[in-house]
């Protein structure tokens, strides 16, 4: 600049000149009112419009919550459970090949009704989605899990809830978890409750402790006097009715090698010790919450000669769970091979392979032999040959479907007595029992919702039968 | 009541100068004080620094519980599910909001030429009331009193109290603008006017304050229809960022960068685009949080398109700031408040790019519900807003007290602790998010992924501890600045140095 010779006249503009008024582009009024105007224009489109136009009717699966479940829902909301557990399963969550993980995609109509407010859709999944949780676990499992989640799943990160809730609040929370998944969840829960009823009667156990009481009580014991097994019936037959019959006699397909056994031990220590205990004796820290209590694997007689302790029986119970007991379906978490390895390992536990630093060896493996009684029972009762029409004829009735899920070992014609000597067990009675439980829970929830003064769909919706979504 | 003063606001000494600062005489300091009392700004800012460490510690509790879930076993109010809402609410409406209001109460009088706010006493009263309500709200959350709607957890009475205090602040701001002596209003002031108004409406609608429900119980403040409630919930939650935290970041950056570099803003036209673009596009993005939910597809489309259109104001802002910084980058290295601001600016740009991608369906399918989203949230709230806030506080405290910060090296420590801590934090959570996303895509259930995340969670805890430490360093530095006579100390040091290097007196 300094080098330039001085010029006469006005200075030459250096580039585009701004008009002075362009510096004053917005007045406070424009920033305030204009800003609000822009804001409300968009609010009209993205808030007012959807709220006033989006009102999907209740889905066929929708069901109201009972009073206890609604109280549990409020506890769930006010204690922030939704920060780790989402409340809807997305299209990509539902997978054909998985056992039970998320049986169905959430539909708009599933969220109908004012007892679903506030929303619990959630934003992060540190734990699993809970919208389809109802019925996969019995209440005693839930109570132990709330007391300390590591009791039921040693890998869990969930905070323990023992200092957060009273016994009564806990039962409300459990009611919510068990009733939140609509009719299909209620049906699943009814199946679990019926399974529990059968198992307790059959094995002579009292009901589980309420609330957190299990933490301070001994493990429940069976009342042997109540058991009068029929002599004409295999004693394990009611237990076998909860296992698909094709597994009753099957052996372990994997070879008994040190590697397989070691992997089995690893998985056992990772997943099973909360209930079955570090010694495998069924006295894990969570055991006192559960009725029936967890299985004891330390008895060599059971391992070699039990009627329902064959490798196939163990495999099936790990894969699909044992409805009515706290045994979960690990099929959604463990590979098939790993489950078979755990089965191999479980058969070595009577020889002390759970001791620390003890490598299980093939010679520890106790070979299971089907007893004469079992062979005879399989040959004469509950024969596979009668089952050609097993799942085709009766698949339309949801209660029978659910009964077949809880008692996969029963053929339509099978009837037997439980070990108390009088209670009858067949698919027909099971379906009737499950239906009664389901109907009872739905009626109670419906009545509660009416008394709460909530808007309800017409009774035709209530009468629609529940679906059985997902792979059963 | 603030009084009008004529003409431009006076030039204040910059916070960090290369020269040893001249000692301010008592009279000079008194004159400064009487010109800008800054009482409200001080109250909001100093309280916010304390809150930063409180909410950071909440975060550290959470990070610890991810590593060892039983770390605080038996203490119900430290249970993860209760601390997490306290952490989130505390970050947004205690730490960041109080920092923003403090900065606003400092900057606004200087920008519009008034002697302090319209009512400094109202501002101070609001600061106390806000702190009290916040304390009550947090105690409520930790004892299980929550509305159960994410980011809107505070129970109804607290919501109402916060809104009243907020409105008093809005009145204070608008009245200050009304009595201004500098007629044209600067870009920052546009946001100072509009943003608190937006948030007041957003908070009132989003918390459904006309639906008190059971006042002490959970189901207050929600719409009856669950999915409508979810749409409203996420519209509200995202606009906490979109209409309050982000515009205020813009406003503060628009102030700090030209002020520290002593350069006029690059373009007013670009500021216009950033202001109106934000108002139109940010308001509609909330539904991108629930793209996989059974809500109307058209609303998801609006949310996705808005999320991408948002890049228009973001780029306008970016170009504007980079244009202003042109030729001034040396100060990035020498001036700490500017370095904080520009680091925050960089993370802000990144979070918007990332957010736009997260709003695309296929990418959303992969990252939804994973730690990737947690990393994204921290990129905005920690990387951008918090780092900006730290710089702004360092800058303003030095200005208000008219003395340099107690220790420059502590400021450096603060900067590097939070920057390295945050970058590591963000990286491990992003990786953990991909780990979760790809595993879930393969059908692996959540619990089976947990053991793989353990290492990430440990790293997150360590990086998180660095962030907590950074906040504590700031408390020490700011506290020592206020309670010690830094200027005099610096002068003595300079004199000693001058004495040492002075040539020895020549003997006659």
Image (tube, rainbow, N blue to C red):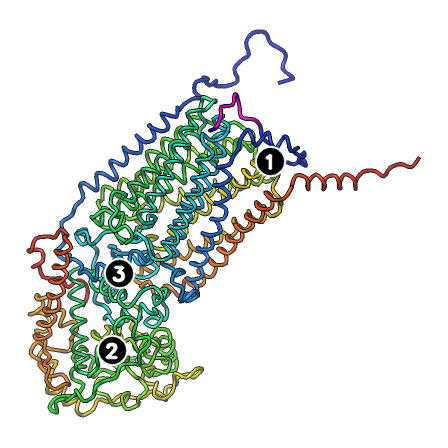
Q: Are marks 3 and 2 on the same chain?
A: yes
- Where residue B442 sits in the image (x, y, percent)? 31, 61
User: On the rendered structure, is A251 left or right of B472?
Assistant: left
Q: Main secondary structure of the magenta part?
A: loop
**Circle 1 marks a residue in which chain?**
B
Which residue is disc 1 drawn over? B402
Marks 2/1: CA–CA distance:
72 Å
Find out whether residue B5 is within the magenta segment.
Answer: yes
**Is residue B388 among the parts visible in the rendering?**
no
Give the number of the disc on residue A130: 3
Is the residue marked by circle 3 packed among few (<14), some (14-19), or many (20+) residues within 10 Å?
many
User: Considering the numbered disc 1 on the image, is that residue within a helix, a strand or a loop?
Assistant: loop
User: Considering the numbered disc 2 on the image, is that residue within a helix, a strand or a loop?
Assistant: loop
Front residue of B220 and B235: B220
Residue B192 position by quadrant = top left
Which residue is disc 2 drawn over? A291
Front residue of B454 and B28: B28
Q: What residue lies at 59% left-to-right and 29% top-to-bottom?
A: B31
Q: What residue lies at 56% left-to-right and 50% top-to-bottom?
A: B473
């Amino acid at each position: 600049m300094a080098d330039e010779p001085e010029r006469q006249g006005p200075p030459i503009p250096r580039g585009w000149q701004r008009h002075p008024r362009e510096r004053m582009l917005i007045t406070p009024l424009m920033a305030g009112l204009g800003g609000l105007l822009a804001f409300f224009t968009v609010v009209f489109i993205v808030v007012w419009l959807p709220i006033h136009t989006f009102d999907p009717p209740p889905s066929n699966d929708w069901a109201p919550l009972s009073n206890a479940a609604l109280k549990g829902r409020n506890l769930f909301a006010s204690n922030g459970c939704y920060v780790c557990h989402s409340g809807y399963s997305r299209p990509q969550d539902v997978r054909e090949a998985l056992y039970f993980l998320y049986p169905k995609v959430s539909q708009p109509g599933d969220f109908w009704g004012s007892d679903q407010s506030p929303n619990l859709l959630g934003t992060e999944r540190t734990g699993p989605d809970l919208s389809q949780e109802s019925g996969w676990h019995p209440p005693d499992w839930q109570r132990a899990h709330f007391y300390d989640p590591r009791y039921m799943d040693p890998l869990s990160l969930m905070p323990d809830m023992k200092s957060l809730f009273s016994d009564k609040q806990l039962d409300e929370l459990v009611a919510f978890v068990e009733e939140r998944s609509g009719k299909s969840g209620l049906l699943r829960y009814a199946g679990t409750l019926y399974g529990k009823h059968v198992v307790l009667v059959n094995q002579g156990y009292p009901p589980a402790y309420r609330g957190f009481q299990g933490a301070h009580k001994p493990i429940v014991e069976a009342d042997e006097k109540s058991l009068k097994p029929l002599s004409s019936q295999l004693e394990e037959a009611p237990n076998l009715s909860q296992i698909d019959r094709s597994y009753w006699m099957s052996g372990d397909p994997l070879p008994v090698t040190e590697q397989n056994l070691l992997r089995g031990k690893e998985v056992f220590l990772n997943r099973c010790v909360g209930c079955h205990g570090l010694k495998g004796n069924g006295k894990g820290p969570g055991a006192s919450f559960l009725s029936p209590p967890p299985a004891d694997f330390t008895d060599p007689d059971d391992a070699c000669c039990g009627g329902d302790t064959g490798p196939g029986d163990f495999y099936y119970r790990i894969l699909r769970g044992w409805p009515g007991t706290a045994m979960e379906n690990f099929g959604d978490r463990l590979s098939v091979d790993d489950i078979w390895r755990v089965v191999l390992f479980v058969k070595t536990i009577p020889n002390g392979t759970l001791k620390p630093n003890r490598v299980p060896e093939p010679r520890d493996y106790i070979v299971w032999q089907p007893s004469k009684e079992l062979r005879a029972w399989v040959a004469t009762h509950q024969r596979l040959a009668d089952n050609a029409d097993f799942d085709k004829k009766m698949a339309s009735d949801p209660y029978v479907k659910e009964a077949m899920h809880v008692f996969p070992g029963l053929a339509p014609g099978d009837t037997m007595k439980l070990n108390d000597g009088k209670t009858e067990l067949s698919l027909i009675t099971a379906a009737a029992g499950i239906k009664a439980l389901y109907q009872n829970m739905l009626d109670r929830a419906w009545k509660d919702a009416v008394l709460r003064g909530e808007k309800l769909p017409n009774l035709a919706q209530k009468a629609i039968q529940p679906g059985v979504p997902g792979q059963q | 009541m603030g009084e009008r003063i004529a003409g431009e606001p006076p030039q204040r000494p910059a916070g960090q100068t290369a020269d040893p600062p001249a000692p301010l005489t008592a009279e000079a300091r008194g004159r400064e004080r009487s010109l800008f009392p800054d009482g409200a700004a001080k109250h909001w800012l100093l309280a916010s620094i304390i809150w930063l460490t409180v909410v950071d510690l909440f975060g550290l509790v959470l990070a610890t519980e991810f590593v060892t879930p039983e770390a605080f076993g038996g203490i119900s109010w430290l249970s993860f599910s209760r601390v997490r809402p306290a952490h989130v609410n505390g970050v947004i409406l205690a730490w960041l909001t109080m920092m923003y209001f403090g900065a606003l109460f400092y900057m606004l009088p200087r920008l519009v030429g008034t002697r302090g706010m319209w009512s400094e006493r109202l501002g101070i009263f609001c600061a106390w009331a806000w702190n009290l309500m916040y304390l009550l709200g947090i105690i409520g959350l930790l004892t299980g009193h929550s509305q159960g709607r994410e980011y809107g957890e505070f129970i109804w009475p607290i919501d109402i109290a916060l809104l009243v205090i907020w409105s008093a602040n809005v009145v204070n701001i608008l009245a200050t603008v009304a009595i201004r002596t500098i007629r044209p209003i600067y870009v920052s002031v546009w946001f100072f006017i509009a943003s608190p108004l937006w948030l007041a409406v957003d908070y009132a609608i989003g918390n459904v304050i006309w639906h008190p429900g059971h006042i002490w119980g959970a189901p207050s403040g929600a719409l009856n229809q669950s999915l409508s409630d979810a749409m409203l919930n996420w519209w509200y939650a995202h606009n906490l960022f979109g209409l309050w935290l982000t515009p205020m970041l813009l406003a503060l950056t628009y102030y700090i960068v030209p002020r520290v570099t002593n350069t006029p803003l690059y373009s007013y036209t670009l500021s216009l685009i950033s202001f109106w673009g934000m108002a139109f596009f940010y308001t509609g993005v909330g539904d991108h949080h629930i793209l996989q939910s059974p809500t109307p597809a058209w609303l998801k489309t609006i949310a996705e398109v808005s999320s991408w259109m948002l890049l228009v104001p973001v780029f306008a802002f970016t170009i504007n700031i980079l244009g202003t910084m042109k030729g001034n980058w040396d100060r990035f290295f020498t001036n700490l408040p500017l370095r904080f601001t520009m680091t925050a600016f960089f993370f802000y740009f990144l979070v918007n790019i990332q957010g736009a991608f997260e709003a695309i369906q296929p990418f959303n399918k992969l990252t939804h519900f994973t730690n990737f989203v947690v990393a994204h949230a921290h990129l905005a709230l920690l990387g951008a807003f918090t780092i900006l806030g730290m710089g702004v506080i360092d800058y303003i405290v030095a200005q208000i007290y008219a003395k340099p910060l107690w220790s420059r090296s502590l400021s450096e420590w603060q900067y590097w602790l939070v920057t390295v801590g945050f970058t590591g934090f963000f990286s491990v959570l992003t990786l953990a998010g991909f780990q979760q996303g790809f595993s879930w895509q393969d059908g692996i259930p959540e619990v089976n992924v947990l053991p793989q995340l353990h290492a990430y969670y440990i790293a997150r805890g360590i990086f998180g501890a660095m962030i907590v430490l950074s906040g504590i360093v700031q408390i020490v530095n700011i506290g020592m600045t206020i309670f010690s006579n830094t200027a005099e100390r610096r002068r003595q040091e300079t004199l000693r140095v001058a004495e040492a290097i002075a040539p020895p007196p020549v003997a006659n």
